[in-house]
Structures are given as C-alpha cells and as structure tokens.
Image (cartoon, rainbow, N blue to C red):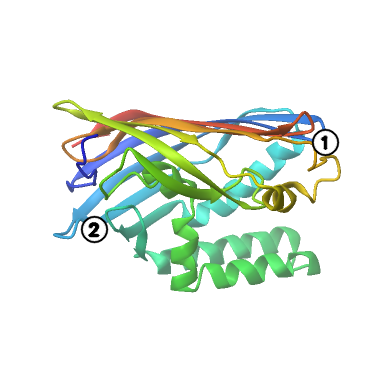
Amino acid sequence: MDRHEICISRPGLQRHYKVLVNGEIVMGGVSNKTSVETEWILTVLAVDSEQNAKIELITLDTHVLEATNEAFRELSIIANQLKKVTQTLVCTIDKRGKVLRVINSAQIADRWNQLKSEIVSMCGRTGDMTDFFNINEKLFNDQEILKLYVGQLEFFKLYFNDLYGRKLSSYEPRKTENAFKTSFLSYDMFLDHDEDSRLSRIRFKGVNFSTYKKWLSEAYGQFPFVDVQKITPQFTIEGEYLMEKENGLLKKAKLLWEEDVSKELRSHTEYIITEKHSSI
C-alpha cells in the first residue's frame, strides 16, 4: 500500500456534494425503510503550514425521498428547523478532519436565539419545551460544547472517516459504536490504497468483529424480542473513497454499514456521496 497521507491542501476551492442515505431498521420484526437526500457545499478558505484548514460548510435541507413510517417525515421537518442554526459553519480543522475551532460561533448563537423566538411565538414557552430550550441554550452558547457537537455532525464523520491526515496501514484495529448505539464494537479493518496521476482511491472492509458473550448482553440485552443466547450477529462495514490527489478533496464515496442480529433486529445503512459540480 502507498503510505502517502491524504490531506486537504489547497485554499480557494469549492465542491458541491449530493449525499444520499438509504436505510432500513427492523425492530421487533417491523421494518422501517427510509431514503433521504441532502447537499453539502464545502469551501476551503485557507490552509496553514501544519495543514490545518479553515473551511466553510453549508448544509442544505434534508429531503425525505422515501419513508414507510410517516412519523419520520414529521421528525425530519423538525430536524431541518434546528439544523438551520448550524446550516453555515466556518471552522478550523486539522489534517485529519478534527474540528479545532468554530469561528462563526456568535452567528450560530444569534441564529439559535432567532429560532427560539420563532418557536415561542408559535408554541409558547410550555413545560414540555423547557428541556429542549435548556439543552440547546448551552450547546449553542458554549464554544467548547459547540466544537464537540460540530465535530459529531454527519459531514465530519462521513467525509474524513479516519482516512485523512495519516499514513494508512493495510490492516489496522478499529472501534466504533454499533448501529443501535448500545455498545462499542471492536474489529479489524483491511484497507487498500492506490492512485494514478489524478486520483487516490481507498477501499476498506471490516473483519474479525469481536462479539463475546458479555458484549452480546450489553449490546442486545435490552431488546425483549432478542435472545442473546441464540444469536450470532453478522456485520458489514465496507466502502470506497475517491479523492483528488492534487488537493485531497473528495470526489465520491460509498459506505455500507449492516448489523444483522436476527429476523427481529437488523440495521442497514448505505451512504452515497457524489460531486455535483466544483469551482476553482
């Protein structure tokens, strides 16, 4: 494997991406399928000598293309309203994509105050909304908490995916939350990295998932329809990323995450990122 580090390395570039997320959750034998689409507009404003980058990220509204559960559509409308607070982000990231600083935090706090006023004018300040207001008040007005929150946004987890800013091995241990966010899952990752004069390509696949008896109880013991004594979960984590060699920006990516526990409990999520157009 070529050990060349992939980093965002040139300022003055902009890329417009379409992000498609296809998912299915089977819970208690009931299947809920969703397909949603959003767009990212990424502008690289500056890159310093340590390869820290100042970026602007605009995240457009999420559109529900398919949902077998109508409540999901309603939740998406609410989520889009809250997402407008951080719809435009200006931040500094390191070469691995970790958020170091949210630069437009004052603007974000102003947007939160505006959204809060709109909610109060429509719904009033009811007791049911107290926790919602308190949590978000602290989130959008505390620089450190905001930085952590932004770093967990879908863009940063998907775009960089622990592939940037370091020399990749062909085989390395990984650890991630399982699909149901009930436990952390350890496994090994095989990676293959090749490149031509223009593009770098990384393919990866998870193997050797660690699912010992105690882990099974921790991950699935809270689901009454799952007998942890009788399950052998199957996992799929695999993907392919294509980046521009000259500047490190993503061209397209595909990621598949499956957790098949039983006929009663299953998760399938497919992420597809494609470039709409670019400007230099």
How many residues crowd mark 1 within 10 Å: few (<14), some (14–19), many (20+)? some
In this view, 226 is above or below 22: below
Q: Nearer the viewer, mark 2 or mark 1?
A: 1
Residue 96 at x, y percent in the picture = 31, 52
234 left or right of 243 in image = right
Residues at marks 2 and 1 touching, judged by CB atoms closer than 8 Å: no
Q: Which residue is mark 1?
A: 28
Label 2 SS: loop
Q: Position of residue 34 (x, y in %)?
A: 65, 30
| Among the 4 quarters of the image, the one containing residue 267 | top right
Residue at 46%, 42% (x, y): give it. 188
Q: Position of residue 50 (x, y in %)?
A: 18, 60
Separation of disc 2 and disc 1 at Cα? 46 Å
Looking at the picture, which amino acid does disc 1 mark? Answer: Gly
Residue 214 vs 141, above or below: the answer is above
Left or right for 114, reference 216: left
Is 56 drawn above or below residue 13 in the view shown?
below
